[in-house]
Amino acid sequence: MNNLNNTAFIDIGNTNTKILLDGQFHSISNTKIQNICNELAFNKAVVSSVQTSIYSTLATTLNKAHIAIVNAAALLARQNIIDLSEVDGIGTDRVLGLIGAMQLSAPPLITVDCGTATTINLLDANNIAKGGTIMPGITTMAKALNEHTSLLPLVNIADNYKWHIGENTDNEISAGIVAATAGAINFFLQHTNRCNLVLTGGYGNLLATYNYPDAENVKYAKHLVLNGLQHLYNTTS
């Protein structure tokens, strides 16, 4: 068990919940979020969420365990790290990713979060969030091909991606989906001034192997949103 005097930083995604606790990273399926207190021990939780129903389940679980909750949205409302005045409706996770990226690379920068959805987000040289794009994530694309065609299988991209050109159906689906995502990133970069590029999410490490000629430099950070959440808490609490 961990020391009870710890704060857990929790990011609820569309599929899984990621946790940073005492310098260690953990992941729990959203379907098992009510078991979090059986697996980890802490006395405060700083929570970011894109899933209101899962957040409600987590909050009920933490309240029963008498664990204090700090909502990331409340922290963002009083932060002065990033200027959000030019964007409307940008998700908490996307803002936290930008804050996390600022600890790795100087703005202007672009973050790409490769989850259930792939989001591309731009922060200019003056720390002003300029918005970005939202597109289906790599796994979401694979599921869509399988569900809307009669012959194409559901492919595990990580297991079947070999190179830019596939040699069988599974390889070809994987190559096409990864190339489409990398192409979207390159298209975004072509329409901005040269920026640092920071990738995160389940397929961020794979996409980081692509060539992005319009990026100043390319970095991969596995837990970018949690890093941003921790920095936000440390600077606003």
Image (spheres, rainbow, N blue to C red):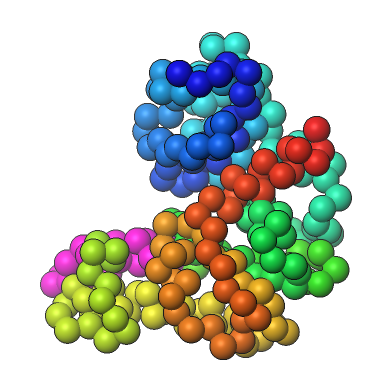
Q: Which residues are magenta?
A: 136-155
Residue 174 drawn at (x, y percent): 28, 73
On-image quarter of the C terminus: top right
* Nearer to the camera, 142 or 7: 7
Q: Residue at x 63, y 18 (%)?
A: 5
Residue 92 is a magenta residue: no
Residue 170 drawn at (x, y percent): 19, 73
State whether residue 150 is above or below residue 22.
below
* Nearer to the camera, 161 or 58: 161
Number of numbered callouts drawn: 0
On-image quarter of the N terminus: top left
Q: Residue at x 70, y 83 (%)?
A: 194
* Nearer to the camera, 38 or 140: 38
Query: 54 left or right of 125?
Result: left
**Is residue 94 among the parts visible in the rendering?**
yes
Q: Residue at x 46, y 64 (%)?
A: 204
Residue 148 is a magenta residue: yes
State whether residue 210 is above or below residue 136.
below
**Is residue 49 among the parts visible in the rendering?**
no
Residue 200 drawn at (x, y percent): 52, 60
